[in-house]
Image (cartoon, helix red, strand yellow):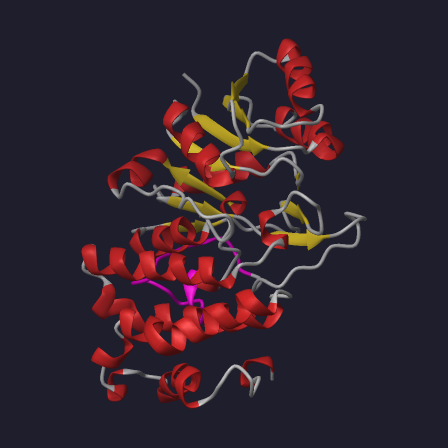
Amino acid sequence: MSVISIVMPIYNTEKYLEETMTCITEQTMRDIEIICINDASTDNSLQILENLADKDCRIKIINNSSNQGAAAARNIGLGEAQGKYICFLDADDIFEKDMIEKEYDAICRYDADIAVVHSAHFKEDPREWNAWEFPWEEQCVSMENNNTGQNLICAWEVAPWNKMYKRQFLERYRLSYQNLKSSNDVYVGVMAVLLAEKIALVGSDRPLILYRTGTDTQISSKLVPMNTYLAFEAIHDSMIKWNIWDKYFESFFSFFYYGMRGQIKSCTNETESRRAYEYIAQEGLRRLGLFEIPKNRFEDKRLHDRLCNYISGSYESGWFRT
């Protein structure tokens, strides 16, 4: 049984797949299983996988008979994983060859539930990457023990590919990816940070993951802001279930405000953008319990006022674009 399971959904990524798989098969951490979920690709992705699997017995291929989406593929891979630790990686990114080893060393050193590594974005040339995360040194943090000065639920990419999870932790809290066309990784990314007793921040002088942007197959390139709202709604409900809402509601609303504002602002489909805005104004804020919390319970009173802009303002005014 391998110590680490790498779960990778694959859909029509033939252009980048071999490069990405080489980054994984040549990792300095050798004790891994590589679970590739071919999500009914219509290009040569499956043939590439089969050729690679013939040369490396650590590669396991699962074929979906129909396209089910990245969330379902990740959940299928998680169900098949045998490792004590889990990584969810994308099939078009570039990983430093010591990334898994660094994550593993840190998660074991601190007996952490999650390890997080630095990442950066690039579009065409990986030498021209761009990073926005705060520059942390190696340390162990949690929502209760946080001296970074950051809201941890949005201090790094919420996506799954920059983390290693303890499988027992995922199973204990029954964390799985939402069946949404977009923003299907937000729920797990946020809830994991909220629930983790220990989060190991992996120190490095460079990004260990280069996330490729602008590809045709990326879900993130097809923004549907209402899906992001549905992710926040599920987070709210789970925070109540696990009795952490009263403790962390302000961190939640801070991420909600900036996350939804960014989604509505960036969405190029005005119908979808307006639909999310109007739902938040008419029903969403109430559904999330904002009006049950007195304003004086917010440390940042301005956050409460900003949230109320959805009601006092309007979509036509465009206040969220400034």
Furthest-top residue in view? Answer: 54
Where's residue 23, x and y in %? 67, 31
Q: Quadrant of residue 20?
A: top right
Look at 49% across and 55% down and name the residue there: 158
Q: Is residue 272 above or below residue 39?
A: below
The answer to which of 84 and 283 lies nearer the viewer is 283
Q: Is residue 295 above or below residue 280?
A: below
The x and y percentages for residue 99 are: 58, 38
Residue 57: in magenta span = no
Of 189 and 110, which appears nearest the observer? 189
Quadrant of the frame with the N terminus = top left
Query: 213 or 140: nearer the eye?
Result: 213
Q: Which stretch appears magenta?
A: 136-153
Horizontal placement of 214 versus 184: left or right? Answer: right
Q: Residue 119 appears at what percent x and percent y?
A: 61, 51
Q: Residue furthest front?
A: 271
Q: Is residue 147 magenta?
A: yes
Residue 285 location, x and y as percent?
A: 33, 74
